[in-house]
């Protein structure tokens, strides 16, 4: 089992829960939501996915723990193992490999994400930021790139820049619940990390946001009528 | 070119006029998913067609969760968050065109019988939604070998580290 925390602020915050519950399986962070958002096209969590022995997707559902989830997983896990195919590893690619890939296919988000990853590991935040800037020139409507930009900004302690990036990502996909909640979380950490998650505040915030939106549409329609 | 589902609204604009004269807003809906058999049900019309959520889910082969927010509509193994405006009556009714659009479907043909207060849809629902991005992986596809930052230790964990074993991945967040 692999547990992936979608926390743009890094491993510290999910780490508290991992410590509290004495989790023994591996837990990782996917700061920019690459797996759920880009690979699976999901915009909500919790989410579970099952891969077979060859890394092939068997099933994926946006669902939390519950009777139905456990029954489905028991059925799927009871299937006999599939033979492992020999396949070259996709790992071990160099910065040059990714640079060649984005040169040949500038619309290939996967190649850009790979290049950002190696740039961050080998040359640090500034170099990764420059790659994100170049990636956004090629793919200006990719919300994942804005999540990566937010991640890099938070690593540098630039909260307002991170919020701006997240809000741009949300504008590109207003239904993305993950980005929406990340914004809340960065803006109002006290509602999430001081005595647990404040769900009452979340419900109230949703209502307020909706009424602001409705008011905005009414104002707009009035404006149109007056015009 | 006008999209069919826009066209049907025009037709139904006429229909609702007729329906108003007959003091009713009920419509019989016949829905065929391309390649399948037609499914019929009763809907209502207020400028959009509203049908029972359970009926729409069955007719379109979707799994719709509309009792608590965030609402979502699952098509096969991929789920879409659904805007609340798509539902009414505590999630029991759903706006049909919006639902079809949400899962990337399209109306390929339609007909409206004004006298009978009946509409016929044939819709095409894609096998899997297409999204821009790395790639939306479908069931049966290999997942790219991503590397993740671990909570403990310094070495990234790659999906290929688990090859040879079934791997259950759970996405969650501290928030």
Image (tube, coloured by chain):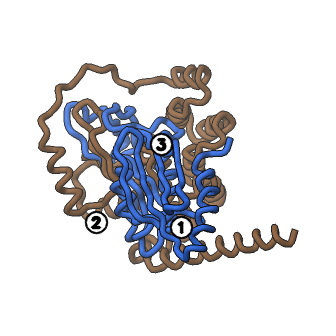
Q: Which residue is mark 2?
A: A20
- SS state under label 3: helix
Residue depicted at x 29% and y 44%: A59
Which shade is chain B? blue
- Mark 2, residues whose alpha carbon is within 10 Å: few (<14), some, or many (≥20)? few
Q: CA distance from mark 1 to mark 3?
A: 37 Å
Q: CA distance from mark 2 to mark 3?
A: 30 Å
- Mark 1 or 2: the one toward you: 1
Which shade is chain A? brown
Q: CA distance from mark 1 to mark 2?
A: 53 Å
- SS state under label 2: helix
- Say which of B105 and A150 sits in front: B105
| Apparent side of residue A76 relative to residue A176 in the rendered image (left or right) | left
The residue positioned farthest toward the right in the image shown: A227
Q: Which residue is mark 3?
A: A38
- Mark 2 or 3: the one toward you: 3
Residue A14 makes an appearance in the image: no
Name the image quarter holding residue B34: top left
Task: Relative to B162, say whether B149 is above or below.
Answer: below
Q: Position of residue A174 (x, y in %)?
A: 58, 57
- Disc with the residue nearer the chain's start (2 vs 3): 2
């Amino acid at each position: 089992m692999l547990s992936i925390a979608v926390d743009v602020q890094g491993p510290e915050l999910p780490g508290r829960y991992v410590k509290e519950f004495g989790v023994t399986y591996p837990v990782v962070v996917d700061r920019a939501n690459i797996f759920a958002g880009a690979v699976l096209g999901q915009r909500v969590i919790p989410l579970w996915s099952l891969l077979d022995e060859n890394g092939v997707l068997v099933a994926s559902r946006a669902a939390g723990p519950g009777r139905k989830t456990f029954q489905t997983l028991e059925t799927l896990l009871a299937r006999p193992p599939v033979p492992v195919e020999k396949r070259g590893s996709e790992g071990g690619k160099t910065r040059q490999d990714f640079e060649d890939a984005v040169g040949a296919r500038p619309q290939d988000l996967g190649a850009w994400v790979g290049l950002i990853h190696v740039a961050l590991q080998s040359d640090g935040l500034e170099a990764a930021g420059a790659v994100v800037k170049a990636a956004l020139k090629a793919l200006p409507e990719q919300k994942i790139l804005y999540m990566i930009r937010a991640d890099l900004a938070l690593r540098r302690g630039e909260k307002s820049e991170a919020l701006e990036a997240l809000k741009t990502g949300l504008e590109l996909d207003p239904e993305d619940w993950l980005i929406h909640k990340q914004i809340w979380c960065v803006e109002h950490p006290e509602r999430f990390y001081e005595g647990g998650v404040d769900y009452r505040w979340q419900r109230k915030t949703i209502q307020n946001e909706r009424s602001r939106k409705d008011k905005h549409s009414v104002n707009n329609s009035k404006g149109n009528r007056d015009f | 070119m006008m999209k069919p589902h826009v066209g049907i609204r025009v037709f139904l604009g006429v229909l609702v006029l007729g329906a108003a004269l007959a003091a009713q807003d009920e419509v019989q809906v016949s829905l065929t998913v391309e390649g399948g058999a037609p499914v019929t049900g009763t809907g209502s019309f207020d400028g959009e067609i509203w049908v029972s959520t359970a009926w729409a889910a069955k007719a379109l082969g979707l799994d719709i969760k509309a009792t608590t927010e965030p609402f979502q509509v699952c098509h096969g193994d991929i789920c879409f968050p659904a805007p609340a405006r798509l539902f009414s009556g505590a999630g029991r009714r759903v706006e049909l065109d919006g639902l079809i659009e949400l899962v990337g479907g399209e109306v390929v043909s339609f007909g409206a019988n004004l006298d009978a207060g009946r509409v016929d849809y044939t819709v095409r629902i894609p096998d899997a939604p297409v999204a821009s991005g790395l790639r939306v992986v479908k069931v049966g596809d290999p997942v790219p070998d991503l590397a993740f930052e671990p909570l403990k230790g310094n070495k990234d964990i790659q999906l290929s580290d688990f090859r040879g074993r079934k791997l259950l991945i759970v996405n969650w967040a501290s928030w």
